[in-house]
Amino acid sequence: MASSSIFKAAAFACAFLLCAIRLAGAAADSPFGSWLAEDIRGAGVIAGVRTTLDILPSGETSGSSGCNRFHGAAKVAGAEIAFGPLASSQMGCPGPVGDQERKFFKALEDVRQWTRDEQRRLLSLRDADGREILRLSETK
């Protein structure tokens, strides 16, 4: 009886481990995850302002522009990606934080491609010409 329980527990652990490995491998081949902006159009980002982007396999996206929260849709097809429509809260964001928010939302409008550097845990979002317009680091 004890050996049967041990066998069942070992089989369950192996199945769980195989599923975890398969999910981890799938994540490397997709832009899905939670991301923190490191660079917007080559101009960096403001230190201490968390501009975030969550992309879900369901096609939902959300995050923070550093001032306002937003949510909407992300369509992923192979190496192509497009965001929108997006809706955000409407708090006033004066000065540099507001400028960064506008640049971030404009960059999301222009995104058409993605690449992922799993080793460095980075997501590069690119325009139709392949130029990097957003670089984000993985947060989870």
Image (cartoon, rainbow, N blue to C red):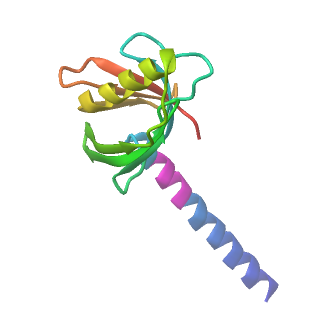
Give the percent coordinates (x, y) of residue 13: 65, 66
Q: Residue furthest left?
A: 129
Identify the residue at image location x=63%, y=72%: 11
Kindly report the secondary structure that dominates the magenta region of the rendered protein: helix
Identify the residue at image location x=49%, y=36%: 91
Q: Residue furthest top?
A: 43
Residue 23 among magenta residues? yes
Residue 42 among magenta residues? no
**Left/right of residue 98 with respect to residue 16 in the rendered view:** left
Give the percent coordinates (x, y) of residue 92: 48, 30
Quarter of the figure with the C terminus: top right
Give the percent coordinates (x, y) of residue 86: 33, 43
* Count of all numbered marks drawn on residues in the image: 0
Give whichever of 30, 56 is nearer the camera.
Answer: 56
72 to 46, vertically: above or below? below
> Magenta region: which residues?
19-25
81 to 60, vertically: above or below? above
Give whichever of 92, 103 is nearer the camera.
Answer: 92
Q: Is residue 113 visible?
A: yes
113 to 16, vertically: above or below? above
Give the percent coordinates (x, y) of residue 62: 44, 45
Give whichever of 6, 90 is nearer the camera.
Answer: 90
Q: Residue furthest bottom?
A: 1
55 to 106, vertically: above or below? below
* Rendered image quadrant of residue 109: top left
Identify the residue at image location x=47%, y=54%: 22
Q: Is residue 54 visible?
A: no
Quarter of the figure with the N terminus: bottom right
Identify the residue at image location x=77%, y=81%: 3
